[in-house]
Image: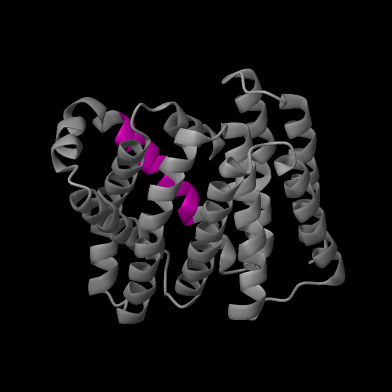
Amino acid sequence: HAGWNLKIKQSGDRWLALWGLFVAGGLIGLPYAFIATLQGDLGLAAWGWATASGAVHAFYIGRLARTYEIADFSVTYPIARGGGALVAAIGGVFFLDDHLSPLSILGIIIVVAGLVILSGQVDWNHVWPALIVASLIGAYTVIDSKGSRSTVGSAYAMAIFVTGGIGTTIQGLYRRRWSEMKASVPTLWRQYFFTGLASLITYWMVLLAVRRAPVGYVTALRESSVVFATFIGWKVLKEDSGLRRILSSILVVGGLVTLVLGR
């Protein structure tokens, strides 16, 4: 996950790279989603959740691209992903009837502490955009967990990428970027295909997991990549304060592990 986010960060046009990822994932998943719909595995309710998720994902992509333009990767990624896992865990309790033990609550507190330390010595003009991204990650995770749990089979992830691809395309048309979108396909289709396929597979696995476990535990394990992302920002992108950011990211992961152990 951190790897394709690095690819987005290094892209010349970050929004365009994210748009291509979602459209490619949607095209890959469309036949499966179509067949599942005909078979009744993807009903009206499932498509309703997927449509809501696609709308949130469109906003998420716009904000993520903008955040990567103005802020360091080693700050943005840990705050967005760690904060998103935190929002999803809390949202799971309130909206999905998930249960968090006292040890899990302690894990949440540790995550918050790690995020505070991580953001304590950076420009808050960079932190706020990452926090907005975190809230959107938490929102679509809760929506998709509900949608996945209410769906027969495993086609829901495909539906998300279909609606997400449509949502981001509408966003691009609204921004009058159609000519750039169309012109990018002949040269970047391989990047779009592989990042879209990788994202579709990994998110499909996440949604299978949330059908069997509280969303907070699944997202906590998924976001352990924040330490790797911080190291990438320090060594690959040559961003400042690498050691402090790595230590605070380790604290975030420690909190996420504590959250899981409290299950």
Relative height, residue 191 to residue 144 (above, below): above
List x then y, in percent, for residue 165.
28, 53
| Residues shaded magenta | 191-204
- Say whether residue 42 is visible: no
Quarter residue 110 falls in: bottom right
- Say whether residue 226 is visible: yes
Relative height, residue 69 to residue 241 (above, below): below
List x then y, in percent, for residue 41.
34, 74
Is residue 195 part of the magenta span, yes or no? Answer: yes
Tell me which colouring the rendered structure shows. one colour
- Between 146 and 204, the one lying in front of the other is 146
Q: Residue at x 44, y 26 (%)?
A: 10
- Between 64 and 217, the one lying in front of the other is 64
Would residue 23 be found to the left or right of residue 50 on screen? Answer: left
Where's the C terminus, which quadrant? Answer: bottom right
Q: Residue at x 45, y 73 (%)?
A: 147
List x then y, in percent, for residue 261.
82, 59
Question: Magenta part mainly helix, strand or loop?
Answer: helix
- Between 161 and 244, the one lying in front of the other is 244
Count numbered badges in the picture. 0
